[in-house]
Amino acid sequence: MDLVIASGKGGVGKSTFTGSLITLLKDYGIAAVDADAEAPNLHLVFNVQHWNEEREVIAAHTATINSSCINCGVCDSVCIYEAIYEADGQRRIKEYLCEGCGACKAVCPVEGAIEISPSVSGWIRTAFTPYGPLVSAELDVGKPNSGKLVTEEKNIAKEWVKEGKAKHIIVDAAAGIGCQVIASLSGANKAILIAEPTPSSLSDLMRAYYLTQHFRIESFLVINKDGINPGYNGLEKFARENGVEILGRIPYHSAVPKSLSSMRPLVEFMPESPPAREIRKIAEVVRGWL
Ligand code: SF4
Ligand code: SF4
């Protein structure tokens, strides 16, 4: 089983839910993939203090200007990322703004003054937690995001399955519908979409849902922070009209931020709190899929 937890919108409690779900299913051999490379946080839910392995991912390119530059300024005019500046009579590159597109090199009149070299775009880390193996990615500041990091993470999780270190994969996808989410959904069997009862969350949920439909992935809905918007039924209406099963409604409760600050999965930290009880019910359904 390759299950993806996704949400069109950030901040709806996806990682809190995913962390608790994996905790409840830990005896079933779950490999956790934190695919939100811009803001990974599953390792915080699991209180990971030590990575078993960490490696750089070279998936970006950066320009450098060497001393043969005659400071003509032609490169400035073509860099739409405004990564080139002048200091002390020399052109220089702001590495965190450079996208490695090569336009500056193409127009530079001095052969070899600009070099485009591969650069570190982020890191992939693995840890063996009490809840099972975890692979997590983190983008370097300013580096372009792509699905490559997520694909590499999923390949590691698939290896764990092949080697018998895990049986199933649960991916905590990034928010939105970009490359990272598309890579997360690639090859998945099912998706659980998390949304909160607000019009903006519904709008983002719809986009995430249509993405799952594009990939023909059966998807389910979990309503988080239930009760924050009394009288609002947009999510229910959407689910009814699209035949999406609502797996559960996790109530808004102070136990959630308390568990986050204690760096423990909610279902362990306050197992009898209303949101933990609801997540247990949802986990029962997911257990039936494994
Ligand atoms: S175009 Fe080439 S020579 Fe001119 S400022 Fe840029 S790097 Fe220097
Ligand atoms: S490689 Fe592209 S982004 Fe980087 S400095 Fe040159 S023109 Fe700008």
Image (cartoon, rainbow, N blue to C red):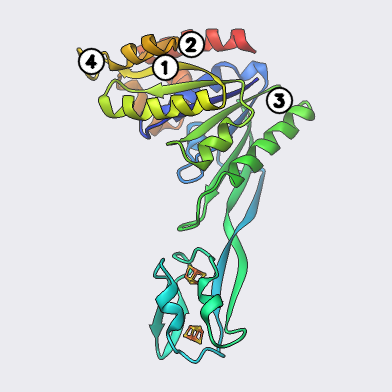
Q: CA distance from mark 2 to mark 3?
A: 21 Å
What secondary structure is found at the residue carrying circle 2? Answer: helix
Disc nearer the start of the sequence (3/1): 3
Disc nearer the start of the sequence (1/2): 1
What secondary structure is found at the residue carrying circle 4? Answer: loop
Q: Quadrant of residue 262?
A: top left
Task: Look at discs 1 and 4 and give the one toward the viewer.
Answer: 4
Could you tell me residue 35's position as x and y percent? 54, 38
- For image coordinates 56% across by 12% down, the residue present is 286
Q: CA distance from mark 1 to mark 2?
A: 9 Å
- Residue of label 2: 282
142 or 123, nearer to the observer: 142
- Residue of label 1: 222
Q: Is residue 259 visible?
A: no
- For image coordinates 32% across by 24% down, the residue present is 202
Task: Look at discs 1 and 2 and give the one toward the viewer.
Answer: 1
Q: Are marks 2 and 3 in contact (CB under 8 Å)?
A: no
Q: Are marks 1 and 2 in contact (CB under 8 Å)?
A: yes
Disc nearer the start of the sequence (4/3): 3
Q: Is residue 58 above or below residue 217?
A: below
Q: CA distance from mark 3 to mark 1?
A: 25 Å
Disc nearer the start of the sequence (1/4): 1
What's the amino acid at mark 1?
Answer: Val
Disc nearer the start of the sequence (2/3): 3
